Amino acid sequence: MQSLYNQRMDNRQIARILRETAQLLEIDGAFIGRYRSYEKAAELVDSLPESVAALAQEPEKLKELPGIGERLAEHLQEIVKTGDYSLRKTLLKKYPETLLQVLALQSLGPKKVSLLWKTFHAGTVEAVEALAREGKLRAVPGFGEKSEQNILKAVATFRKSSGRFHVHTAEEAAERLIEHIGKAGKAVASVTPAGSLRRGKETVGDLDLLVTLGAGHTTKAKVETLAEHILEFPGIEQTLARGENKVSFTLEDGMQVDVRLLEKESFGAALLYFTGSKEHNVALRGRANEMGYTLNEYALSTLKGEKRMAGASEEEIYAKLKLDYIPPELRENSGEIAAAEKHALPKLVRREEIRGDLQMHTTASDGKNTIEEMATAARQLGHEYIAITDHSKTVTVANGLDERRMAAHIRKLREADKAGLGIRIFAGAEVDILKDGTLDYSTEILAQLDVVVCSIHSYMNLEREAMTERMLAAIENPYTQIIAHPTGRLLLRREAFDYDMEKVLDAAARHGVAMECNSYPRMCKERGVKVVISTDAHSTQNLPYIRFGVTMARRGWLEKRDVLNTLPAEKFLGALRAKPGARTAAAAGAGARRKSARRQ
């Protein structure tokens, strides 16, 4: 049983236990060095490509990891073997486990949570919410009336997010389940994710999987045998239901999984139905009724006589309804059916059309890898260019670079670009937008950069008008080229900044400033604002996540022409907002190469 448990303990679970231990230690008043060691270990485990559970079988391999000594190696082995950590369990005898939920609230770090516990014995989200509603926090040192309002907003976000999971968590669970179900051999023809995961939503509630039965495996006895095999998946916490063609269960992290067992002839109808969204399905069924059909999860049939017309594939169902095939990402009943009828659906941007990644961090600030390591990993993903964008000086928590360090860093980036790594390296920076809308670097530094990415990391709770003016001031700065993570959201943790998005996007359109993908891509498209798709990677392991950015862009109806980093390197540089004065060194170098080529 223990070896089975080792197999299912993934890095994210291990990192969560380490991080919660660090938070509980900080609440308990431990020295900073003690809890920081657990925080650093959690960050390391989260970024590792190797399975810590596998490495734990040979302790010496754990000790080879950077920052992992003998004691931490023993702690990791304990977590892998038991699924928990004794120090965490000891602390949770002293403090309620619900305190971990309070820690998840935006703007409440361990120190403030500790103060709330010591002052009010508030150990639940409900208790903290009550204190904020009753105005009991405004006189507490470190809090105030504004803090109470922010806590109430954070509680609302927490409740809305409860029971949902990041898309990559759902994707990884789906991959593990598909691998397990596939071991049933010829009993399974295919396993296909459906639901919000297939539509590419940023967060997922339940996970839907459709299993088409293999030829000769549709008898009741063989379906029951397959259901038994599915329920042997090692990560199941509780079986919820088991019917003739469906099994439902929850995984250890609380995610519900519904697996439906289908015959091939109904696959398309079931995939259409269970992909959703509900609103898209309702509109589609209404259209079917108007055309004399009925549409359900089994088939498209005539209303009279129930003659089967289609069902094996989604494509044939859409065709019978006189519609072009609608990609799953667009199925939100937001105009896609009318566009499909008029043959006016966008030709959505594809992952293979992305030529570069325009936001990433290295060991120069808070990244885990060097310039050369990030460049090599990006090249292996097929990128033609990258922009290294380490943090500016105000973000001290992320080891932001002051002007002297940034000037030296730019020189290193130029040298790396010339080093023959097989990929262009642009000198960039993620420059903080300060409270008054000014940028965190002088024009002298900004002029040297090839790519100026601007973002907000402080004063995130400004009033709507003040935040709008701040964003507008940054966009009006002639050195601003790209606004990074413009909404400021942290999925399932923090809501978007409160500002007038329409005003900001209109200003971006006027000034030629591009937006990163998470800023309402469809609104960008409508205004002619160009978009970039970037990872904000802090390690080489984050770089493949660009596929999620592409999915979000597709959900926003974006095409190749809407996305700047589908352009070749030189055209990309030319498409960025031109900065005052001389061209950047990279652009000048590109011009020199073009002249040389013409002479030849």
Image: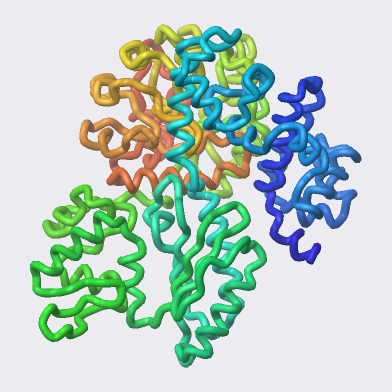
Tell me: residue 530, above or below residue 301.
Answer: above
What is the x, y in percent for residue 462?
41, 14
Q: In the rendered picture of this protein, how many numbered marks are placed on residues?
A: 0
Residue 338 in view (yes/no): yes
Tell me: residue 169, above or below residue 367.
Answer: below
Could you tell me which residue is drawn at 45 percent across and 25 percent down? 152
* Front in this rendered view, residue 109 or 173: 109
Among the 4 quarters of the image, the one containing residue 374? top right
Question: In the picture provided, is 464 more to the left or to the right than 15?
Answer: left
Residue 420 in view (yes/no): no
Quadrant for the C terminus in the image? top left
Quadrant for the N terminus in the image? bottom right
Question: In the picture provided, is 495 more to the left or to the right than 465?
Answer: right
Could you tell me which residue is drawn at 29 percent across and 42 percent down? 561
What is the x, y in percent for residue 570?
40, 33
Could you tell me which residue is drawn at 19 percent across and 79 percent down? 301
* Front in this rendered view, residue 330 or 382: 330
Among the 4 quarters of the image, the one containing residue 306? bottom left
Could you tell me which residue is drawn at 44 percent across and 9 percent down? 435
Tell me: residue 32, above or below residue 124.
Answer: above
Query: What is the image's colouring?
Result: rainbow
What is the x, y in percent for residue 190?
47, 75
What is the x, y in percent for residue 103?
61, 30
* Front in this rendered view, residue 57 or 509: 57
